[in-house]
Amino acid sequence: MKRPTSVLTPIKMGPNKKMPSKTSAIPKGEGRGRAYERLRERILALELQPGSPLDEATIGKDLDVSRTPLREALVRLAAEGLVELLPNRGARVAPIELPQLQEHLEAFELLQRTATVLAAQRRSPSDLKEMEATCLEFENMNSAGDVKGMMKSNMAFHQAIGVASGNRYVQKMYESVLIDGLRVACLAMAYECYGSTEAYEQHMQNILREHRALVQAIKDKDVTAAIKLSDSHSDLARLRVTDYLSRNLIRGISVHSLRVEESLNV
């Protein structure tokens, strides 16, 4: 069976970075939630490569869960766009292709700007408290070198901005594009995705600085600053993706081979 190709490749973490460990058995009675969480972690960490097949028998044995809770976990992951359910062929990790990355970055930029501007106009004291707390949590996870924690707290920070927008439709769409881009976000949090230690540290400092500045702009109800910072933050994400792809394409990834084979049996 030919192995699927993908834009993104598995990441090996440095000595100071933590990622999900090898899956251990799930306690009886917790199969549904834990199977979903464990699979989600491995997909987001790129341990399960985009486009790769998900053999239910193997995964069920690995997680020590029966077929029913595993299938329910796959359905949940499919609803988030992390898994594709294939008719009569099981499931596979949702592929990430160049056109999809471009669409994601465009949508992310527009929705982030909209959510941030509305948050600057409408935020409540409780909204600010949540943004400050998640911003601090991200900084703590960065100091601890916990990539999984960084991804989780970064997601929570941007979700808090979405809530502060005061618009349920904007919040829902913004959260959807955030979830869709979680694997892309892994590129910004993983040390090994950078050309050097200096490049990694500089990028992380830019993220930390902009998170604090975003909170301050929203707190001050400074719409002009919110727009500027939102666009700059989107540019950081775009820079990470383009830099990662350029270095990996040079290493031999063919642009013509980026599309995942439609059939898993070729």
Image (cartoon, rainbow, N blue to C red):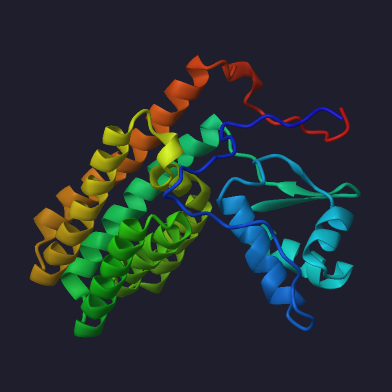
For image coordinates 33% across by 49% down, the residue present is 110
Q: Is residue 237 above or below residue 256?
A: below
Q: Is residue 109 left or right of residue 177?
A: left
Image coordinates for residue 89, horizontal then vertical, percent: 88, 47
Q: Of 6 and 199, which appears nearest the observer?
A: 199
For image coordinates 65% across by 20% down, the residue present is 257
For residue 120, say whether it is visible. yes
Q: Is residue 66 above or below residue 154?
A: below
Image coordinates for residue 252, horizontal then vertical, percent: 57, 15
Q: Is residue 225 above or below residue 137?
A: above
Image coordinates for residue 132, horizontal then vertical, percent: 23, 72
Residue 149: image quadrant is bottom left
For residue 81, say whether it is visible. no
Image coordinates for residue 185, horizontal then vertical, percent: 44, 48
Residue 51: image quadrant is top right
For image coordinates 34% across by 30% down, the residue present is 196
Q: Is residue 233 above or below residue 226?
A: above
Quadrant (top left/top right/bottom left/bottom right) for the N terminus: top right
Q: How many marks?
A: 0
Q: Which residue is outermost to the front?
A: 15
Q: Is residue 239 left or right of residue 64?
A: left
Q: Of 71 and 33, which appears nearest the observer?
A: 33
For image coordinates 39% across by 65% down, the residue present is 153
Quadrant (top left/top right/bottom left/bottom right) for the C terminus: top right
Q: Is residue 19 left or right of residue 144?
A: right
